[in-house]
Image (cartoon, coloured by chain):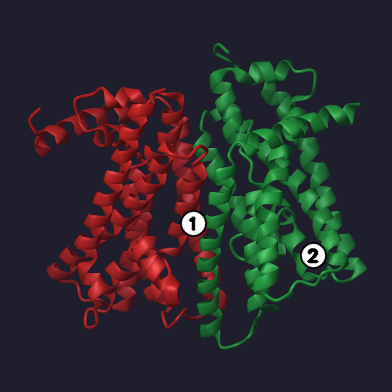
Chain colours: A red, B green
Amino acid sequence: MRKRGLGFYAGIYRKILIQDLKSKMSYRADFIISTIGMIMTNLAGFVTFMILFHNFPTINGWDYHHMLFLYGFSLVALTPVQCFFDNNWNLRFQVYSGDFIKYCFRPINVFFYFISEVFDVKGLGQLAFGIGTIVYAWIKIGIPLTPLVIAKLIVFLLTASLFMIALMNFAAATCFWLKGSGYVMVIMFRFKDFAKYPASIFQGIFSVIFTFIIPIAFIAYYPSLVILTPDNVPLLSWISPLFGILFFYLSYKFWMLGVRKYDFTGS
Amino acid sequence: MNLKRLLSLTRVGIMSSLQFRLGTFVTLFANLIYLVLVYYLWKAIYASSGTDVVNGMTFSDTMIYLILATALFNFLENFVVWDMSRSIQSGKIALDLLKPMRFRKYTFWSYTGNHVVQFVLTFIPTFIIVMIVTKGAINLGLNLLWFIIATVLALVINYNIEMMVAPICLFTESTWGINIVKETIVLLLSGASIPLAFFPEKARMIVQYLPFRAVYDIPLSMLLGKSGSDTWQGLVSLFGLQLIWLAVLTIAGNIFWNCAVKKVTVNGG
């Protein structure tokens, strides 16, 4: 089979997306409530944040507005995983019930087909919330607005989002080996709550673990430093795009390894 | 005889939870990592604040509170909302409704097994780790007894909150949305994500009387001897709050469920 180009996959994605949105529209109440739920979680996160700053004016040398920027950055960076990769949450059910086999019989990439099946609209609420927070913090800190900075922001937001996607891929793929692996996903998803704090709070061995093994530090902290402290950007921030791509690639390989293993066991 | 029947449901629950032993160990391990995150965050926070005691909570108080809140969260977590919506979709709920036992009672006792397993495999190890790490900062006395009683009450209250929320899915067909709203409210207002002592004065006045506090904050306050639980008067008022909410939620939940169950439509099963 010859290799298919990006255009081919983009066309398929568009078709699947339209079907998915159509089926979502038939559950309008669900859509509205889910959107409210999403807004509520973001509000609750925000309230927790406010309560924290009500008691403690700075955290590890970071003042309110810089923390707010980091918070908004993490929200935007977490949007792609919510919007495009939400079907990972269904993976384990499909694997146990045996329905997963249907993805293996299509002449397209299994990972692509599986992931493209669901587009989560409610993630857009989080995006709006995140952008609003970034804009507010941006103005308050007084970062100069130039095309270069905007370009950097977009590149590093995309970089940051790769890490969470990769983490969730890893977590979801564990279901090929473990029974009841829903916990792994739930816990990974909870780890993301710590992305909004400066990673400089970690010390010793854990700073290594949370940078390179469970890369929470890359979900917001390192990429955002490129914007926040342009005069003093650590090397890790600059190489984070490369590292993100590598991490995503590894998670993809791990996921596909699981698929191959699934083929052998059958259902 | 009746109790024996109920306990057999517990036994079944224990057996089916033990099917996922590996999952439990993964949870325990991941929890430890999570606790490391909590530790570093609050260490940094207290280091930047310049004082040792904030709102009557020292660093070790806050840590114990949050660590045990996480452990309690794992212990109390149940999937009533999810399970109910799935059993409505598959039609299994029809069979459960036909069982010669009240549905609410049946569901509660089927979850107890899972709670027992979680208590032994996640809560107790976490508790022991906390004891070792903080070198016995938790006072082991009568407060332990109060904590256990309050936790059992919290379990029932939590179940009742779930059972208030789950039937809403019958009307809305939205499980994820309803569940996330519930979880967000419970975790924020119960003090599981940030101790209630840190809330601004006015917010705390309101949150203090809500049922969510009875789930996490009251048991943990009793363990730590906070919120006046070191006096008899304080104990009585805390237990009183739990019992009042327990009664209110049980009655309201019963009424709500009896109305909702008439709406159940099952396709197949």
Within 10 Å of the Cα at label 1, are there few (<14), some (14-19), or many (20+) other Cα atoms? some
- A47 left or right, relative to B76: left
Above or below A141: residue A36? above
Q: Quadrant of the C terminus of chain B?
A: top right
Q: Chain of mark 2?
A: B
Look at 77% across and 53% down and name the residue there.
B151
Query: Is residue B2 toward the left or the right of residue B263 in the image?
Result: right
Element carrying mark 1: helix
Q: Quadrant of residue B52?
A: bottom right
Residue with the mark numbered 1: A43
Distance from Cα at disc 2 to Cα at disc 1: 29 Å
Is residue A193 visible in the rendered structure shown here?
Answer: yes
Q: Please state the chain letter of the residue tagged with numbered disc 1 in the rendered image.
A: A
Task: Count the numbered circles shown.
Answer: 2
> In this orientation, which residue lies closer to the viewer: B200 or A171?
A171
Say which quarter of the image contains residue A220.
bottom left
Q: Residue furthest front?
A: A264
Is residue A80 shown above or below A112?
below
Q: Toward which corner of the image does residue B207 lie, by quadrant?
A: bottom right
B201 lies left or right of A28: right
**Where is mark 2, residue-wise?**
B222
Image x and y of residue B59, in percent = 63, 78
Percent position of residue B186, x then y = 63, 51
